[in-house]
Image: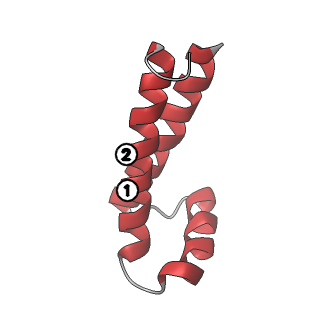
């Protein structure tokens, strides 16, 4: 079961990383950006936030799927 949830978590992290890098206009990402702009304000800080958090979630999901953490 850890493999399933770890891969799902890694996929979400990859989605956030790619959308943050490309500044995507995908509807789900735009909704996330609209919520994050309340805290981060206008500008590129929101996209940098999603890049960094996406990378962290991607790595943690990969480690979880591999069984290295959260056994």
Q: Which residue is mark 2?
A: 55
- Circle 1 crowding by C-alpha within 10 Å: few under 14, some 14–19, many from 20: many
Labels 1 & 2 near each other (Cβ < 8 A): yes
Which residue does the image show at 39% across and 34% down from the upper left? 59
- The secondary element bearing badge 2 is classed as helix
- The x, y position of residue 34, in whole percent, is 60, 75
Q: Is 15 placed above or below 53 here?
A: above
Report the residue at 45% width, 61% height from top.
24
The dot on residue 51 is: 1
Quarter of the image with the C terminus is top right
Element type at mark 1: helix
Where is residue 32, by image quadrant? bottom right
**Position in image of residue 36 (x %, y %):** 56, 73
Q: Nearer the viewer, residue 66 or 26?
A: 66
Q: Nearer the viewer, residue 11 or 71?
A: 71
For the N terminus, which image quadrant? top right
User: Which image quarter: residue 43?
Assistant: bottom left
């Amino acid at each position: 079961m850890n493999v399933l949830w770890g891969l799902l978590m890694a996929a979400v992290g990859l989605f956030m990383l790619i959308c943050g890098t490309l500044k995507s206009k995908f509807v789900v990402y735009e909704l996330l950006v609209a919520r994050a702009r309340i805290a981060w304000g206008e500008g590129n800080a929101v996209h940098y936030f999603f890049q960094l958090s996406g990378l962290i979630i991607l790595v943690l999901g990969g480690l979880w799927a591999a069984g290295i953490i959260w056994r």
